[in-house]
Amino acid sequence: MNKETISLEMEVYEFIEDLEERDARLLRAARSETKNAYAPYSQFRVGAAALLTNGELVKGTNQENASFPAGICAERVLLSTASSLFPGMAIESMAISYDNINGNSDKPISPCGICRQSIYEFQSRTKQPIRIIMGGQEGKIFVLENAASLLPMVFGAEDMQ
Ligand code: THU
């Protein structure tokens, strides 16, 4: 028996001013996009913004539903929007932020499990790793070079060959 370890490396920034300008711009867009969320049930407004490889900016917010499972996360709204407006175009980087109306918004959040799987599918099919920038309205910021590291032992199309 052998033991193996899977580790995750990320960059941690104290201030948005410390980010590269293109990342800072994307995080600002995600922060501001939270105001367009439809989150009357959770009061947890999530905003995502992505820079496509053609230079376009695409945004998404969570859209909830009285039938809770019918709601959809900001990240998957963004992926569907990108893929509908610019079919086949890759995403270079995506920022994710939130505004927790009844609590704090000062720690990064990372995409939920379903979104991780969807982000992985998107980057696999476009053959371009997606850089992920995570931050609240304030506080520390995490940056991952490749969204694949969010989902160790991922199940993907390659496993079905
Ligand atoms: N949510 C997102 O949109 N993205 C995430 O990364 C985490 C959770 C949404 C789903 C739901 O509308 C609300 O946040 C609370 O879970």
Image: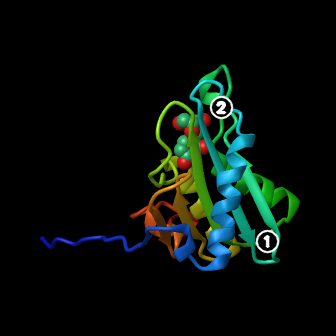
Please give the name of the residue rendered at 71% of the width and 59% of the height, measured from the top-left corner. Answer: 29
Residue 90's image quarter? bottom right
Q: Which residue is mark 1?
A: 89
Drawn side of residue 130 relative to residue 155, left or right: right
Gap in angstroms between the C-alphas marked 2 and 1? 29 Å
- Residue 140: x %, y % from top left: 44, 61
Crowding near the residue tagged with mark 2, few <14, some 14–19, many ≥20 C-alpha atoms within 10 Å: some
Report x, y in % for residue 23.
62, 72
Identified by mark 1, the residue type is: Met
- Say which quadrant the N terminus sits in: bottom left
- How crowded is the residue under tag 1: few (<14 C-alpha within 10 Å), some, or many (20+)? some
Q: Is residue 5 left or right of residue 161?
A: left
* Quadrant (top left/top right/bottom left/bottom right) for the C terminus: bottom right
Q: Residue at x 71, y 33 (%)?
A: 38
From the viewer's perspective, is residue 65 above or below residue 25? Answer: above
Q: Which residue occupies 50% across, 45% down?
A: 105
Q: Which disc is residue 6 wearing?
A: none
Q: Is mark 1 within 8 Å of ligand 1?
A: no
Tag nearer the camera, 2 or 1? 2
On the question of residue 77 being in view, the answer is no
- The amino acid on which the numbered mark 2 sits, given as a three-letter code, is Ala
Asked if residue 40 shows in the view, the reply is: yes
The quadrant of the picture showing ligand 1 is top right
On screen, residue 59 above or below 53: above
Q: Which residue is disc 2 drawn over?
A: 39
Front residue of this view, candidates 115 and 63 = 63
Q: Picture coordinates of residue 124 (x, y %)?
A: 62, 70
Residue located 87% across and 59% down the image: 85
Q: Is mark 2 within 8 Å of ligand 1?
A: yes
Under tag 2, what secondary structure?
loop
Q: Earlier in the sequence, mark 2 or mark 1?
A: 2
Q: Could you tell me residue 99's position as x and y percent?
A: 58, 42
